[in-house]
Structure formats: C-alpha cells, structure tokens
C-alpha cells in the first residue's frame, strides 16, 4: 500500500538541495550552503551522496583564483524527485 521512500532523498538536507536544484537547474556551493543553513562539511558529505546516486553532477573549477563548485541536477535526479513527491503524496492522500 505504501511505497518505500527514496532513502537518498529522505534526508532533510539532501531533499532541500535537490528541491533547490530542480527549480534553478544549477547552483554554486555557497548558494546551497546559504539556502540550506548547512555547514560546509555537512553539505559536502551530503552532496557526495546525492552525486553517487546519480542525481546531481558536481563541477569544480576556479573563478578569479578562487575555487568554485557548481552543482547541477541530472535527468535522473529530476525523475527521482518527482517520484519521491508522488510517493509522499500517497502517504498524505490515503483515504480512511
């Protein structure tokens, strides 16, 4: 009756990151850190987990001699997010 929720997206921080990226398509690490009120270390760990699932791509480069990390949602990430939302709606809309 209830579908298992995606464990990658079921983490509050990972869900927040993917939610942001679905709406903006790509974002800098500092933007994600600010929007999620996360620490740099925790955000880095969670981004790696999302990347390993294939939901985001991470590009590291330099801008004006400063490191810059850009995160982009992948088609697989959009699909996983949409499925997660749909599965969650089933929990909310269960008829008694």
Image (cartoon, rainbow, N blue to C red):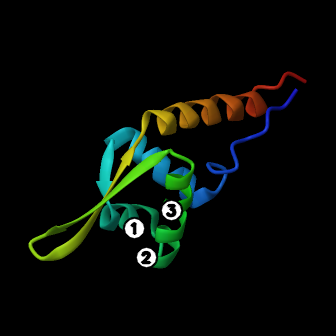
Which is nearer the N-term, disc 3 or disc 2?
Answer: 2
Q: Is residue 92 above or below residue 95?
A: below
Whole-angstrom CA distance, mark 2 to mark 1, is: 7 Å
- Residue sitting at 48 percent across and 48 percent down? 18
The residue carrying mark 3 is 48
Q: Position of residue 6 (x, y in %)?
A: 69, 43
Which is nearer the N-term, disc 2 or disc 1?
Answer: 1
Q: Quadrant of the N terminus?
A: top right
User: Which structural element holds mark 1?
Assistant: helix
Q: Nearer the viewer, residue 91 or 70?
A: 70
Q: Residue 59 is drawn in which quadrant?
A: bottom left
Q: Position of residue 66 (x, y in %)?
A: 17, 76
User: Which structural element holds mark 2?
Assistant: helix
User: Which structural element holds mark 3?
Assistant: helix
Q: Quadrant of the C terminus?
A: top right
Mark 1, mark 3: which one is toward the viewer?
3
- Residue sitting at 76 percent across and 26 percent down? 93
Q: Are marks 2 and 1 in contact (CB under 8 Å)?
A: yes
The residue carrying mark 2 is 40
Q: Position of residue 68 (x, y in %)?
A: 24, 67
Whole-angstrom CA distance, mark 1 to mark 3, is: 14 Å
Q: Position of residue 89 (x, y in %)?
A: 69, 30
- Residue sitting at 57 percent across and 49 percent down? 53
Disc 2 crowd, CA 10 A, few/some/many (<14, 14-19, 20+): few
Which is nearer the N-term, disc 1 or disc 3?
Answer: 1
Q: Nearer the viewer, residue 26 or 60?
A: 60
Q: Are marks 3 and 2 in contact (CB under 8 Å)?
A: no
- Residue sitting at 31 percent across and 62 percent down? 31
Mark 3, mark 2: which one is toward the viewer?
3
The residue carrying mark 1 is 33
Q: Are marks 1 and 3 in contact (CB under 8 Å)?
A: no
């Amino acid at each position: 009756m209830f579908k298992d929720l995606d464990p990658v997206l079921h983490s509050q921080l990972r869900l927040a990151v993917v939610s942001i990226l679905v709406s903006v398509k790509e974002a800098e690490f500092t933007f994600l850190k600010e929007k999620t009120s996360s620490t740099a270390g925790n955000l880095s760990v969670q981004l790696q987990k999302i990347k390993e699932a294939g939901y985001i791509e991470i590009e590291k480069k330099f801008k004006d001699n400063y490191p810059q990390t850009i995160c982009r949602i992948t088609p697989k990430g959009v699909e996983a997010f949409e499925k997660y939302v749909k599965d969650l709606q089933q929990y909310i809309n269960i008829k008694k």
